[in-house]
Amino acid sequence: MKVAVLAGGRSSEHDVSLNSAAAVREGVLAAGHEVIDVLIERGGAWSHDGDMLSLTPGGGLLGVNVVFPVLHGPFGEDGTLQGLLELLDVPYVGAGVLASSLCMDKVVFKEVLAAADVPQVPYAGVREPRWRAEPELVLRELAVLGTPVFVKPARLGSSVGIAKVSSEAELGPALDTAFAHDSLVIVEGFSPGMEVECAVLGIGSEPDASVPGEIVLTGGADWYDYEAKYTDGGMELVVPARLPDHVLEDVRRLAVDTFVRVGCAGLARVDFFVEDGERVLVNELNTLPGFTKTSVYPKLWEQTGVPFPALCDRLIALAIERFELERSVAF
Ligand SMILES: Nc1ncnc2c1ncn2[C@@H]1O[C@H](COP(=O)(O)OP(=O)(O)O)[C@@H](O)[C@H]1O
Ligand SMILES: [Mg+2]
């Protein structure tokens, strides 16, 4: 197969993407495929071997069989890129347009899960115009969440723009910080639970779930912030998570259930809080999780018996299988 690996992108996770893409590149090569590198610059331009690309709807991408977008955050993981790839008419790894964009939006994602009574932390979405118009009323409404709360841009990742707020006085400034990244902000009640992550792989109604892993903060961070995520020694992944077998099974079942419910395809990492060692709450679902060799997603598969190159190979095969299925219906 000729595989285009898309790297970089316009979001604040550009550098993370470059690291992930370098690892994917190696994995795809090790699986015996050919790699075509495509760089997406911070400004949004696409290039290959130093030449700017121009794209033609229906014209594919550089003659490749499949595209592996290794992009995180806005304009990569949020459905916009997936829409472009649909119009180019080329198979691509990962979730389609709707699942990508709905999982990127922490408010919409939670609403969809809430409709099915999936356990989650209490939360409220706040739009910027409303915050500007009636800040006191907004603060009063948010008071029901108690303290601490987490304040987050609704459609970002890597903990960028997130604040843990322990007093009412800090809430307004935290909202302003989050609004600098997104006009929609989510405020969540605090969960003291263990952070557990589960990798999902597949398409259709019965994808596979990995052994769940536990995020242990080892660098002294209070929560899993940007530094803890990307600094050596910031975190340790303990696999399997130190939970009873039946709780690990609950995590895996809920990971698969969430993946299927939102219509994901290919891959996703589903993140949880497990309270009191048994109550499993869904935190979020990442449709294009970090993909360096030391990232959680590939590590969980490695511990489940799927080495890195085999994982890349499987994702490529799934992308083609899904493309053929979707193009086989009348539209
Ligand atoms: N409601 C919450 N209760 C406790 N910790 C939280 C909560 N929300 C977020 N966190 C902490 O912040 C981190 C980042 O939040 P998350 O929603 O996963 O955003 P991102 O998409 O940036 O990863 C989590 O891994 C966790 O450590
Ligand atoms: Mg997260």
Image (cartoon, rainbow, N blue to C red):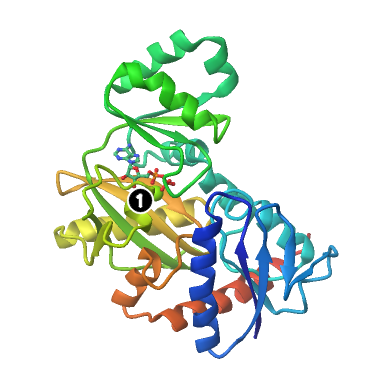
* Residue 146 image offset from top left, x and y in percent: 28, 21
Amino acid carrying mark 1 in the image: Glu
| 188 versus 43 height, above or below | above
For the C terminus, the quadrant is bottom right
* Residue 293 image offset from top left, x and y in percent: 40, 73
Q: In which quarter of the image is residue 245?
A: bottom left
Q: In which quarter of the image is ligand 1?
A: top left
Q: Quadrant of residue 198?
A: bottom left
Q: Is residue 292 left or right of residue 12?
A: left
The residue at the point 66 percent across, 58 percent down is: 82
Q: How crowded is mark 1: few (under 14 residues within 10 Å), some or many (20 or more)?
A: some
Which residue appears farthest toward the bottom when viewing the image? 32
Q: Exactly how many numbered labels are in the figure?
A: 1
Assign a secondary structure to mark 1: helix
Q: Mark 1 points at which residue?
A: 227
The residue at the point 36 percent across, 64 percent down is: 296
The residue at the point 33 percent across, 69 percent down is: 300
* Residue 56 image offset from top left, x and y in percent: 85, 65
Of the pair 147 and 311, the residue shown nearer to us: 147
For the N terminus, the quadrant is bottom right
Q: Is residue 135 left or right of residue 77?
A: left
Of the pair 244 and 149, the residue shown nearer to us: 149
Q: Is residue 66 left or right of residue 132?
A: right
